[in-house]
Amino acid sequence: MNIDHHLDAATLVAYAAGTLGEAFNVVVASHLDWCPACAEDARRAALLGGELIGNLEATPVSKDCRSKTLSMLDTATLHRFPGTPASGGEVPEPLGHLLGGKPLAELPWKRKAPGLALYDLPLSETSGGKLFLMRIAPGTAMPEHGHGGEEITLILSGAYNDKFGRYARGDVADLDESIEHQPIVEPDAACICLVATEAPTRFKSWPARLLQPLIGI
Ligand SMILES: [Zn+2]
């Protein structure tokens, strides 16, 4: 896999520190599964964090702190733990777990607009973000849009181009709200992406705004 577009350093540090939202965690963990370079950076960021914690002064904690912490493991999201690869390499392992090993073609995709289908992935109730798979037909131009918050997209198959270059399998678009772009999918195959957002995506043009409630992204 030839990966050209990587995670932002700030995203990697936040991931290592455990401060990323649930949806972002899945996309980041999925990219790390495919990208040795970012995985190494994340490992270093975690080591650095460990050093910093090691230098802090000790703080007294409650008697039940240990048992409370351990019981939280029962509800922890499992994508950060290693396990049996479920997908045969079609998707990264953390995503494969969330899909229960189902191939992408067998998911109950919902058609949202001509050339666009979505599949929502469940998150816990406290998550403020959104996590979904997006399948865009060959040759489709997405409406030009900015972002109400941050958005991280991992390309699973196919490819698209925008003003930042070509994005293909393994690449991530780690965008903040100031970025506007218009991805155009290449003509030979559909593009399937894993997308995490922190706030609803805001499409800029009038037709696109009308479309937004229907598309639901
Ligand atoms: Zn990377």
Image: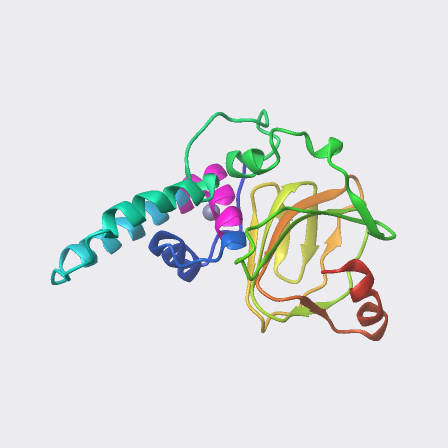
- The range drawn in magenta is 25-38
Residue 216 against residue 87 in the figure, above or below: below
Expressed as whole percent of the image width and height from the top left, the position of residue 102 reads 66, 29
The extreme front residue here reads: 63
The C terminus - image quarter: bottom right
From the viewer's perspective, tell me whether residue 182 is left or right of residue 82.
right
Residue at image coords 42%, 32% = 82
The N terminus - image quarter: top right
- Please state which of residues 207 and 76 is positioned toward the viewer in this rendering: 76
- Please state which of residues 29 and 69 is positioned toward the viewer in this rendering: 69
Residue at image coords 48%, 57% = 21
From the viewer's perspective, tell me whether residue 73 is left or right of residue 60.
right
Residue 213 against residue 40 in the figure, above or below: below
Residue 110 against residue 97 in the figure, above or below: below
Q: Main secondary structure of the magenta part?
A: helix
Residue 201 against residue 38 in the figure, above or below: below
The answer to whether residue 58 is seen in the rendering is yes
Disc tally is 0
Residue at image coords 88%, 52% = 114
Expressed as whole percent of the image width and height from the top left, the position of residue 131 reads 61, 52
From the viewer's perspective, tell me whether residue 134 is left or right of residue 178.
right
Residue at image coords 70%, 50% = 160
Residue 212, magenta (yes or no): no
Expressed as whole percent of the image width and height from the top left, the position of residue 166 reads 64, 51
The answer to whether residue 40 is seen in the rendering is no
